[in-house]
Each structure stands twice: as structure tokens, then as C-alpha cells.
Image (cartoon, helix red, strand yellow):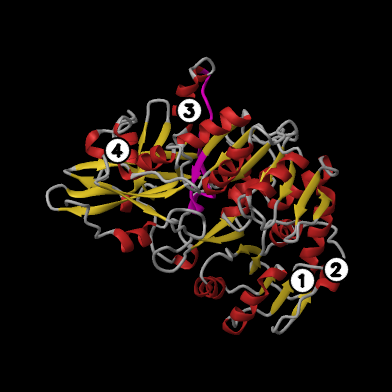
Amino acid sequence: MLGLMQTRPLLISTLVDYAASQHGGREIVSRDPEGVIHRSTYAAVAERARRVGQALDMLDVRFGQPVATLAWNSFRHLELYYGVTGSGRILHTVNPRLFPEQIQYIINHAEDGCVFFDPVFVPLVEQLAPLLPHVRGWVALCEADSLPAVKVDGLLCYEDLIAAAEPAAEWPVFDENTASTLCYTSGTTGNPKGVLYSHRSTVLHAFAACAADSLAFSARDTILTVVPLFHANAWSIPFAAAMCGAKLVLPGPRLDPESIFLLLQQEGCTAAGGIPTVWLNFLAWLEPQRDTIDLSGLKLQRVFAGGTAPPRAMIEKFRDWLGVFLLHAWGMTETSPLVTAGSPLAKHADAAPETVVDMQVNQGRQVYGVELKLVDADGGKLPHDGRSVGELKVRGNWVISGYFKNEGGQVLDAQGWFSTGDAATIDPDGYVQLTDRLKDIIKSGGEWISSIEIENLTVSHPDVFEAAVIAIPHPVWQERPLLLVHAKEGREPTRAGILDFLSTRIARWWMPDDVLFVESLPHTATGKLLKTELRARYGNHVPAGG
């Protein structure tokens, strides 16, 4: 017997309609590349998004066709988030930090019908346009008097385009499993692969993001969205914020520490999300002036970080300097991305501060809607005892079933589990600790050494800005760790000093065989350490006396 309940489709358009209806006056604040602040509201975003849908009709973009964006975090980009998806097209947010050859590949692979772009990307657009046969129209995200001269066919002005379109009276209603957004992996090895989200998966993911033991968004929040809108749906922040009516602050391309601080202060942000590299820079800027700068206007309560693990020192500095809780969340483009969140349990209420930090450095506990398990090399299930290290697998309502156009072939096992490519432990409370990417694990004398843990401990050294660990060959132990250190500006740490610092914090056999000091460390387009490049540069390094 079936229940006698209505089954309305879970569509992204319902999110922006709800926000416009129940939180219509709540602000959407964005800053353009020149630093000019623009103020909008959910009601205005919803009305203009309906115009976007009609404009796509005028451009003859068919239902279900991908539409690309090359844009920073702005109110116009947010309007596309809803106008493209709500009208039944697929929003394809392109990462402009990728190599031009990769951008060319993914726009052609997606068969995007048109591209909406920020004027700052004119040189990139002119370089790519002759190589993109599927693209029929180029729309500059600006007003008519700011329309740049671009050597492309079919150039349009966004403001003129939506002014000429009447807002749709109603959003179309269709199957909730219809594709909604398309994001490509960063493609550090081989071509990027497309992850095609659905309306259903996106709405369910937004519910999970709003949950109290997850990112805990509410109508009382003002969220600084540092994570780019082109990165895995900006961790669902645009959708989750609309679901709860939170104020959104979109910083554009200016992510230097002072610009971030000014927005936090001026807009009264209570929450902010971005990758650890952004927060490392922010804290390094704050450190020399925190006793003189005015922090009284800050309303910041929590920062959430993902992409890579935030170092322990970062968590402690946010706590001690600003009274801010850093919530560590984890996921992948393939998982929408939220899988775990580092929220405390009841037992942490009276725990010592260091015990709470012990919890925060973990990747967190799985949120409702996904499942996790650990397996050994033979696929056998491992216990959640906090000690057993195995490959982490995931399945759930917003986890991929396959890549776009079946690139990569079958990605799920017979039970529907997706292999994350991460090695991890899970403790009895459910907290996940990633020990490494499987391809980055250091195997020394038959034992595994966690590069992530060594990196995070090294960053807690007062003279270290960032650190990376890779494996180098060893004639006896197979592999040994090599530590690469990017020192803070004006600091000059020594090899002996770094090793002495680590000697009381890690097992003796984990100690790096050598320490090299570098001017900078390479990162992927999503801010992760680019260890393939580090291995190519330093993988054959021979330690002094080795």
C-alpha cells in the first residue's frame, strides 16, 4: 500500500521561488572586479532569473542543453544559477583557472550552446572562440555602456538581453531527475570528466547543507561565499542559502585578505566558506596586526573549509584570535560535494579545547543521505575503529552513478559504491580521517605514512606558511617522505629546526628523510597541492648522506 501524500517534483526553481516569497527582501551583495558593491535581493534575483529563462528561449537554446559560464562570484552569475536550471537547461560552470586547452576540451565536450562571460575574460574568450564550433552566442555579463570589444560572432550584452525578455509567469515543471548543472573535475591526469547533477540531487543536497550538524545555514546568517561559483556548485551555498533565506555576499575575484576582511566587517558576515589556502593567507595577513586592527565589528561565528585539510594551527588561530569555530567539511565534485562535516557531538560540550580541535582536524562525520565504508586491498570491509586504514567508498542520493557521456566507463561496484581514491580511517564515533590520496600514500617498510598529517603538523610551526610531503625512493624501505616547506615571508626556518619541531609530534619512523625549502608550492585549479608536479620535480631527490 502506498502512502496518500503528494509528490511534488524537487526542482531548483522551487528554491528561488521560496526565497523570493518568504525572504524577498533579504540582500544579495556582490563586489565587481573594480571593487564596486552591488546590492540586490532574492525577489530581484528571482524576477531576473525568469527573464534569463525567456532570453534562452529567444536564443534558441533547447531544453536540456548545457549553457556555459566563465564568471566570478556575482549577482549576475547567481541569476544564471537559477534562470538556466529553472528553465530546464543545464548550467555548466567552467573553471577559468584551468589551462585554455582544458577549457576548450570541456566546452566542446559539453556541447555548450552559448557562453556567458565576465568582461575580464575577454582575452580568453577571443583565444577560445574559433575553437568552439558548438557555441552560437557569447553574452557579456555587463551593462551596455560597459560592453567590451570582443572578436567573436554573436556578441550580446546581458543587461540588454534580459531587459528584452519578459519574465516567465511560471517555471516549467518536469521530472526531478532532469539534469541541472554540470561541473568538470580538475583533470590533473588526463582530460577532465563531467559530473552531471540532477534537480533532485541538488535539492536534497541543499537540505543536507542546511542541517544543524552540517553547514547549519539559517535565515539569520550572512554567508561570505569565497568558494567560487564554478567549483562544485560552490558547495551548494547558492541553493542552500535560498532554501533558508540567508543573506549572500559574493566577493568577485578579489580574494586578498584585506578585501575579505572588509566584506566580513562591512556586511556583518556570520559564516564564510573557502579553501584552506585562502584562510592561510588571511591569517598570515592578520597575524602582525591583530592587536592593532579593529575586530569589534566582526560578527563572524564560523568558517567552513574544504578541498584540502585545514591545518591544526589554522583551527586554533581562528579560535584564539577571533573566537571563530572552523568547521571542516569533506567531499568531491563527484559527491555534489558534501559527504562529511566536522560538527561536535554532545560529549564535546564539556571537552577540553584540544580535544575539540582533535575532532576538528578530522574530515567529520557522514551527513544523512550518504553512506561510507572502508575496504582493504581485497575489497573486504574494515572496522570503524580509528586505526584500520583502507580505501574510502561512498554511495548516496547525490553521488554520481557515472561520468558525463560515460567517460571513464563503469565507476560503481556491484553494490553501487563509488571509490573516492582516498585512504582513511573511521573512528567509533563516525569521524573520518583521510590519511592520503591512494596515489600519494608513502609506503615505507610495509607501513603507511600519512603525508597529510606531516603537512598539517609542519604548518603549525611558526615560521611555515605551507608544506607538502611526497615519497622518494629508498633502497631498503622502498619509499621515504620528503618534506617541502614554503616559509612565511621574512622567516628563515632551518632543516634542523623543522625536524626537531616534528620529532616530538610524529613517530620516529615517520620523520622526513630531508627538508627542502621552496619559494612556492604548485596548486591545482581548485587550490589543492599539485603533487604530480612535485613528484616530477623532486621525486628522485637524494637526501644528503643518502
Q: Earlier in the sequence, mark 4 or mark 1?
A: 1
Do the residues under discs 4 and 1 have CB atoms within 8 angstroms? no
Q: Secondary structure at mark 1?
A: helix
Q: CA distance from mark 4 to mark 1?
A: 52 Å
Residue pointed to by mark 2: 165
Q: Earlier in the sequence, mark 1 or mark 3?
A: 1
Residue 57 got which mark?
1
Q: Earlier in the sequence, mark 1 or mark 2?
A: 1
**Quick one: quadrant of the N terminus?**
top right
Residue pointed to by mark 3: 357
Report which quarter residue 374 is drawn in: top left
Q: Secondary structure at mark 4?
A: loop
Q: CA distance from mark 1 to mark 2?
A: 9 Å
Q: CA distance from mark 1 to mark 3?
A: 52 Å
Do the residues under discs 1 and 2 have CB atoms within 8 angstroms? yes
Q: CA distance from mark 3 to mark 4?
A: 21 Å
Q: In the depicted view, which residue is nearer to us: 45 or 505?
A: 505
Q: Secondary structure at mark 2?
A: loop
Query: Residue 123: where, in percent of width, then height?
Result: 64, 76
Dot 2 crowding, Cα within 10 Å, few <14, some 14–19, many 20+: some
> Is 470 left or right of 107, judged from the image as shown?
left
Residue pointed to by mark 4: 389
Query: Residue 345: where, in percent of width, then height?
Result: 51, 23
Residue at horizontal 77%, vertical 42%? 266
Which segment did they paint magenta?
Answer: 329-346
Q: Earlier in the sequence, mark 3 or mark 2?
A: 2
Give the residue type that dot 2 points to.
Ala
Q: CA distance from mark 2 to mark 4?
A: 56 Å
